[in-house]
Image (cartoon, grey):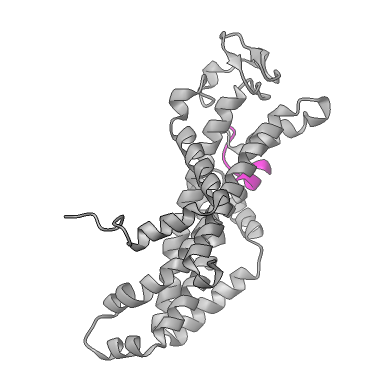
Amino acid sequence: MAVTFLQPGSPTRRFLGDFRESWIATGALAVVVLIVLLAVFAPWITPQDPYDIANLSLADARRPPGFVGSEGYVHVLGTDAQGRDLLSAILFGLRISLEMGLAAGLFSFVLGASLGILAAYLGGRFETAIMRFVDLQLSFPAILLALVLVALLGQGKGQLIVALVAAQYAYFARTAFGAAATERRKDYVEAAAATPLSGRRIILRHLLPNALPPLIVVATVQVANAIALEATLSFLGLGLPETEPSLGMLIANGFQYMMNGRYWISVYPGIALIVLIVAINLVGDQIRDQLNPRLRR
């Protein structure tokens, strides 16, 4: 079967061509790809496994960048308060940030899009109940809801993902409902509903494809927000346990040493976190511009 999505004149090829016109977006995408590759191959390119407590030495704790440790290798970014190689801890922390962000974004996408599209298609009491609950949830800050849920569920990756999904799915539901409700009122959808076509086929063929462009834009924003939320919760001590050093926890562990001149423990993980979030948001902005004809040049 011939591959058509990259043929000259295809929508995908035009989209990629327009995307390359923005050097900022292209650079941000390159940064995201580089971070993903570094995170994926972290176990093979880092000098130390920060999860292995047996490899940690408190004698090497809080050492400055360029310090040669007891194991003989150079700690390029120094060490943290537990004696971890900071570069290794940052790359493994990026793995956790990406894992939490992508998992929360995916589950929020599926749950929110399903509820929003079903509410637009079914209407009536189901629409009223779902959308009023979504509107009520959107009136509360996401960080507040995540804090409450993490405090109730406890620490762990599964509990943290549940809290992030509960705090973010409403954005997808509201977006999906707005796009699907507009499409649901069009004549061709009304005509399809009057035929023997099943509701599932109408949703998958007509409502979902038209709701996907704005949902993709929301997904990029919410992945970055999930990464920031996870880092915030870990900074407050409510995220992952200390045996899994996320970026937020690395920043928190070094915060108390900032006034003593040991800036690197918090600053370098903070820079990595900021670069990741900003790069994802810049890519999302370009995708939004490409999918919205009003924003295209």
* Residue 237 is covered by the magenta coloring: yes
Name, please, the residue furthest toward the right: 259
Compared with residue 10, is residue 132 higher up or lower down, i.e. above or below?
below
Please identify the quarter of the rendering in which residue 245 is found. Answer: top right
279 relative to 235 in the view: left or right = left
- Up/down of 139 relative to 183, above or below: above
How far across and how far down the image is residue 50, in percent? 54, 25
| The C terminus - image quarter | bottom right
Residue 20 coordinates in the image, percent (x, y): 48, 52
Could one spot residue 280 in this view of the protein? Answer: no
What's the magenta region?
Answer: 230-243
Q: Is residue 113 at least partly visible in the picture?
A: yes
Q: Residue at x 48, y 44 (%)?
A: 99
Q: Which residue occupies the foreground of this view, 31 or 237?
A: 31
Q: Quadrant of the N terminus?
A: bottom left
Q: Is residue 255 rendered magenta in the image?
A: no
Count of numbered circles in the view: 0
Residue 142 in picture, x, y percent from top left? 62, 60
**Position above or below: 271 against 229:** above
Residue furthest to the left: 1
Q: Residue at x 70, y 20 (%)?
A: 62
Left or right: where 268 falls relative to 291 = right
Q: Is residue 10 left or right of residue 102?
A: left
Where, by quadrant of the figure, is residue 192 drawn? bottom left
The percent position of residue 251, horizontal first and vertical second, equals: 68, 36
Q: Looking at the image, which residue is at 31% across and 55% down?
A: 6
Closer to us: 25 or 141: 25
Name the residue nearer the viewer: 39 or 230.
39
Q: Is residue 252 above or below residue 47?
A: below
Residue 139, image quadrant: bottom right
